Amino acid sequence: MDKEEKTTYAIALVDDEPRIHTMIREVLEQGGLVSRFESFYDPFSFIERIKIHGEAPDLVLLDVHFANSGLSGIDCIPHIKDEHPYLPIILLTGMEDADIEQAQDYELVYYIPKPVRPEQLIRMIRFYVSTARKSGTRVAELKGDLEEHKRLVKQLSTELAQTEINTWSADPKQRGTEDRKAFQRIVDIILPLMHRTELSPHFIADLEDLFTKDFPLFKRTVDAIVRFDTSETTPPGMRIHKFHAGADTYTISVTHKARILYRVISATGKKLLLRLDPDHNDKLIEKWLREYLEPTLKGTLY
């Protein structure tokens, strides 16, 4: 269950009219909306505050026009976003169309025309703080996913390199057991990396066979799988062809001869890797499609 979202906020007002500060502060306090209220009477002092102190308020109310400042509210926005990209800003102004269009180039920037109606201001603050928090949370999750992906790719690279060394140094009597363990470690790293792609049991069995027979080609195949899954389009240098003998079946070229057979799962949009064909053997793949795949099309594709 999500934690209950707090209903009071730290709000900063940047405006050169003292009466605006008095009015808005009273509105927010009477509405039970503010836990901390900070007043800034020119844009420079607010920019200095967020650059030096770091911690941002939950929302900024920002005037557009400042007398004798040399800096407008619109000019402030990139400085604020450099420090806090997901800090919501509500512009207080009777903006003209050109100003509105310019302000809308930035994320989480809104406007409310003066004179400000108290009920509208309170409603907008609650809505836009909530929107900003959801955006920030989603971005944090995406960054976390990216860091985890980088970690797994690095771990995979290390495991492949260590396995290659071990194939030359291991006792031949122990190779069978060690190879199985090494292959399973590699698969255990590959599977969490896959977000758009699934590996069928047939494909994993082909991979294991290749692991013991041609490790350099195995490494190239693993690299192709990871690149194929990561990219939404065809990765550079990777050729994809329609396979002539299977409906909605395609191949990915790993080398000029080796290829991967896959299908798109209509229910999920994911790509299912069916077989690994290191020898470009059309007859073998056609036979497999007839004997193992076609009878199961109404059920599982595995």
Image (cartoon, rainbow, N blue to C red):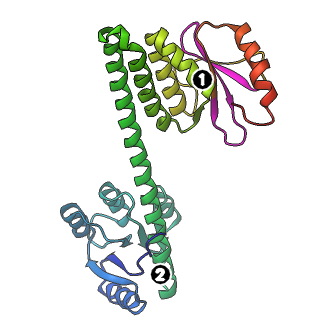
Q: Taking 266 as reference, is 116 left or right? A: left
Binning the other alpha carbons within 10 Å of mark 1 as few (below 14), some (14 to 19) or many (20 upward) gives many
Relative to 203, residue 142 above or below? below
Residue extending farthest to the left is 52
What residue lies at 38% left-to-right and 81% top-to-bottom? 8
Could you say where residue 261 lies in the image, as x and y percent from the top left?
65, 20
The secondary element bearing badge 2 is classed as helix
Q: Is residue 100 magenta?
A: no
Could you say where residue 33 lies in the image, as x and y percent from the top left?
40, 84
Q: Amino acid at mark 2?
A: Leu
Look at the image and tell me in which quarter the C terminus lies.
top right
What residue lies at 42% left-to-right and 81% top-to-bottom? 7
The secondary element bearing badge 1 is classed as helix
Along the viewing direction, whichever of 15 and 4 lies nearer the viewer:
4
Please tell me the numbered disc located at residue 121.
2
Relative to 294, residue 52 above or below? below
Mark 1 against mark 2, which lies toward the viewer? 1
Span colored in magenta: 248-272
Q: CA distance from mark 1 to mark 2?
A: 59 Å
In the picture of the structure, the residue carrying the numbered disc 1 is 203
